[in-house]
Image (spheres, rainbow, N blue to C red):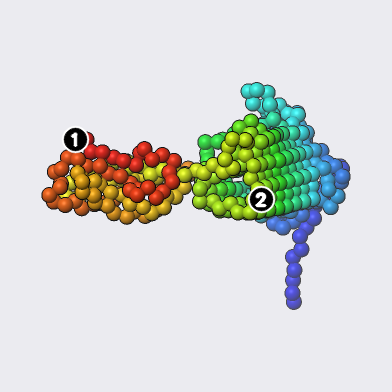
Amino acid sequence: MISSVSSANYYVNEGTSHKDITDWIKNDAKAGDNLIFNTSSYNLTNPLNITKSINIKSNKNTQINFYQEDYMYGMLFITAKNVSLSGLTLNHNGNGNFQDYSGGEIGNTIQGTHVNIKNTVINTNLKWGVSILIEKGNIVNCTINSKSVGIGVFKWNGSLINSKIYSKEVGISKNILYPTRGDYWNGNMINSTIVSEGKGVHLTIWKGKIINSTIRSNGLKSDGINIEYAKGSIQSSKIKSINGYAVKITDTVKITNSSLSSRKGLSKVYKYLPDLKVDKAFISGRIAYISISNIGYSTSKPCYVGIKIGKTLKKVPIKSINPLIPGNNQKNKINVEITLPKKLVNNKLKTVKVDYYNKIKERNKKNNVFKFIL
């Protein structure tokens, strides 16, 4: 005998209340069940908390309008894993009283842990609003319209595919409410478009690929892409900034077959570079102990560190040094030992220099040298 388990459907009609939906999620819904909106429009009067791994969808392209007079920070709060959202139009209408000091409404339309979103339109009409703020999940065939931020990034593992973002402030951005927490995006942007009246993509950390996509930023001194710590590539894409750089990015990111346009007078690409610094050096017996750090934005190439004593040079090769990335525990320092000729130990004219043959492009060459105090 072969048994099978099919998903259960819960249909939301015109008379279905917010309580009806939350009671079903709490008491009856199981992983894989479907919450199906069965009307052309539905007014949501309170935030909807999704605590089960369900599918939220519509076969009628339901417009869900979020109206609430007192507290309306978030429209959908998703705390379960493997939630999917499809076939909807979400309107976060921004007429509530949860505001910042300047009187502008604050809120997120979708906030969650693990959500895959497809074939969905999101309209976020808040002065300080984020359309999507998730930790994991792909956004596919979606259109995002935001008066503030399209996608907010704290720790997002997922890709933007075949989608469009139109924003007044930033297309993809670090978390505007908690910018000091750091941000990390591990994912791709493929066949997608970002048009922003402010910044295009503005992040601290990114790993992935941008392929066959368009990014345009129109804001004052705003860049198309600005990512300080990045690994990946930009391929076959169009990136334009009216008033800033087309791309500001780590120098290891490869850009190929792409059209870049910056403000007149600026280069098309601004590269964030490594920056090697000799932190300290001291001599004990015949050993010179040298501490070197990378205080820049990208991994340095292998090079040499040398100690010059009078006219005599002793040098050793050093490996690549990672930068100190915010929120990452990787080391950005190394210690080097150089054995000195016995007859030169007491010589007072000693200078230490990292990147001895100037093979590395750096943010600052002035901190490469350490001179012993005579």
Q: Residue furthest bottom?
A: 1
SS of the residue at dot 2?
loop
Circle 1 Cα neighbour tier, 10 Å, few/some/many (<14 / 14–19 / ≥20): few
Most foreground residue, 350 or 339: 350
- The residue indicated by pointer 2 is 237
Secondary structure of residue under mark 1: loop
**Foreground: 69 or 205?**
205
Q: Label 1 belongs to which residue?
A: 374
How many labels, in total? Answer: 2
Residue closest to the far top:
102
Q: Quick one: label 2, few (<14), some, or many (20+) residues within 10 Å?
A: many
Image quadrant where one finds the N terminus: bottom right
Residue 66 placement (x, y as % from top left): 77, 36
Residue 209 image offset from top left, x and y in percent? 60, 53
For the C terminus, give its image quadrant: top left
Q: Position of residue 61 (x, y in %)?
A: 83, 48
Q: At 26% across and 38% down in the image, what residue appears?
A: 371
Q: Amino acid at mark 2?
A: Ser
Disc on the earlier residue, 2 or 1: 2
Check the image and report above or below for 277 versus 257: above
Which residue is located at x 35 percent, y 49 percent?
Answer: 357
Q: Is residue 4 above or below residue 78?
A: below
Q: Is residue 278 visible?
A: yes
User: Is 327 on the left-hand or right-hand side of 222?
Assistant: left
Real-space CA distance between mark 2 and mark 1, rounded to the nearest whole angstrom: 56 Å
